């Protein structure tokens, strides 16, 4: 009976994949991205390099085909951009699939919301634009790392905006990464929407908030007679009604079909600490990933929970004295150390992920 249920589940996943990608538009940017992605991966296959796909930032859910309004996910891309740098430091080539305009590796150091990039610059006595002396050493160090990653062709940046663009890119990248075998790693740090509007239920033009004009935009982009439901986002009197569908769960397809030899790392963000471990274990079992990294919204920069198939549960924490925003309760010597050398938790997360990846490679992938 269990085997029969598993077979039915696999069939539903396959049918869901076929239906989704047949009915939701292929992004216009995808072919261009593949043209740079394919040689990047092929080069690292030849070199027997480890390659990490790092996804980062939030996904939008457009309400109109010609998008004016959309639903967004909370994420600036800090975890992904920071982790990408540490993967590069640990010898990985990195495909950085990121939300357009979210934080990027290296430039993130100078993209703080409280600082304008121009604040790091000044003009010399002769009128030349130069880096302010206070930031010379830091900027030179970051620039050298970035130039090395570019020179050695270790970093490829690919942007997305909507959840549909994200899903299309994830599938195509995963299948292109198959030749890497166990040297491939997926680090799924993007905040992906759980809900979306299918293409056939999306209105073409801007939704009119005025009741006098709302009726003019009730048609969808679909011409099929079978779709008789109201558009997913529409005006009902003075109210905006949004009826979202669940995003198909393709994470199991990633493991079973798209890139079965790769190591898969996913994230689980929660606000209720009492369910973090349970939900992380549930996700690990449901999607057959190698590692789920659980984190709480308010403490995600200081501690995470590793839940793995091989090693059980493990907390990774930044010492209190090394937390950039938590030095007030420390001793003076600890304050001095924290002020000079705050520790990013990704510097602890990524080496541990790399260690687990090494175990998978050395033990051989059974699936």
Image (spheres, rainbow, N blue to C red):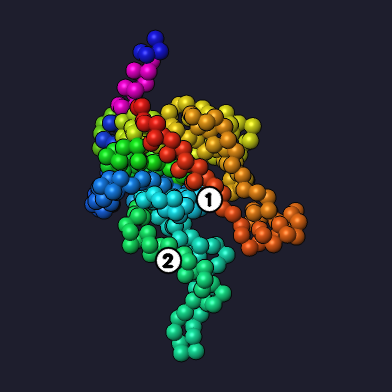
Q: Which mark is residue 347?
A: 1
Rate crowding at label 2 as few (under 14), some (14 to 19) or many (20 or more) other CA atoms within 10 Å: few
For the record, the magenta segment spans 5-16
Question: Residue 365 sits in which quadrant?
Answer: top left
Q: Main secondary structure of the magenta part?
A: helix
Q: Is residue 66 left or right of residue 59?
A: left
Mark 1 is surrounded, within 10 Å at the Cα level, by few (under 14), some (14 to 19) or many (20 or more) other residues, namely some
Above or below, comparing residue 194 to residue 217 in the picture: above
Residue 312: image location, x then y, percent: 54, 29
Q: Is residue 338 magenta?
A: no
Q: Give the Cα separation between the discs numbered 1 and 2.
A: 19 Å
Q: Residue furthest top?
A: 1
Measuring 66% from the left and 62% from the top, which residue is drawn there?
A: 339
Residue 202 visible here:
no
Task: Relative to 12, say whether 81 is above or below.
Answer: below
> Where is residue 190 drawn, in percent x and y?
45, 45
Mark 1 vs 2: CB contact within 8 A:
no
Residue that lies at the very extreme toward the bottom in this rendered image: 126
Q: Is residue 136 above or below residue 285?
A: below
Front residue of 42 and 96 = 42
Q: Is residue 13 magenta?
A: yes
Which label sits on residue 144? Answer: 2
């Amino acid at each position: 009976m269990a085997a029969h249920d598993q077979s039915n589940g696999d069939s539903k996943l396959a049918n869901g994949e076929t239906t989704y990608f047949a009915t939701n538009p292929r992004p216009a940017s995808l072919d261009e991205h593949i043209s740079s992605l394919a040689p990047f991966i092929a080069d690292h296959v030849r070199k027997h390099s480890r390659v990490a796909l790092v996804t980062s930032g939030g996904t939008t859910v457009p309400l109109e085909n010609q998008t004016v309004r959309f639903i967004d996910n909370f994420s600036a891309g800090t975890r992904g951009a920071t982790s990408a740098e540490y993967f590069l430091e640990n010898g990985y080539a990195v495909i950085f699939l990121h939300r357009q305009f979210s934080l990027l590796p290296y430039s993130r150091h100078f993209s703080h919301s409280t600082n304008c990039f121009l604040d790091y610059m000044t003009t010399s006595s002769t009128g030349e634009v130069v880096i302010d002396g206070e930031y010379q050493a830091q900027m030179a160090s970051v620039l050298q790392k970035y130039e090395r990653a570019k020179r050695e062709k270790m970093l490829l940046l690919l942007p997305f905006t909507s959840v549909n663009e994200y899903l299309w890119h994830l599938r195509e990248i995963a299948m292109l990464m198959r030749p890497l075998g166990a040297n491939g790693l997926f680090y799924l740090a993007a905040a992906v929407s759980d809900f979306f509007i299918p293409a056939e239920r999306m209105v073409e033009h801007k939704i009119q908030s005025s009741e006098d004009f709302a009726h003019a935009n009730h048609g969808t982009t679909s011409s099929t007679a079978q779709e008789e439901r109201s558009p997913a986002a529409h005006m009902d009197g003075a109210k905006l009604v949004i009826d979202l569908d669940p995003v198909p769960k393709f994470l199991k397809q990633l493991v079973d079909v798209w890139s079965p030899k790769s190591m898969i790392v996913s994230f689980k963000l929660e606000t209720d600490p009492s369910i973090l471990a349970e939900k992380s274990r549930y996700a690990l079992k449901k999607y057959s990933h190698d590692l789920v990294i659980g984190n709480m919204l308010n403490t995600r920069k200081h501690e995470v929970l590793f839940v793995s198939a091989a090693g059980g549960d493990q907390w990774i924490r930044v010492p209190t004295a090394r937390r950039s925003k938590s030095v007030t309760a420390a001793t003076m010597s600890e304050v001095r150390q924290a002020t000079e050398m705050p520790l990013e938790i990704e510097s602890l997360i990524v080496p541990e992920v790399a260690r687990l990846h090494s175990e998978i490679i050395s033990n051989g992938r059974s699936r």
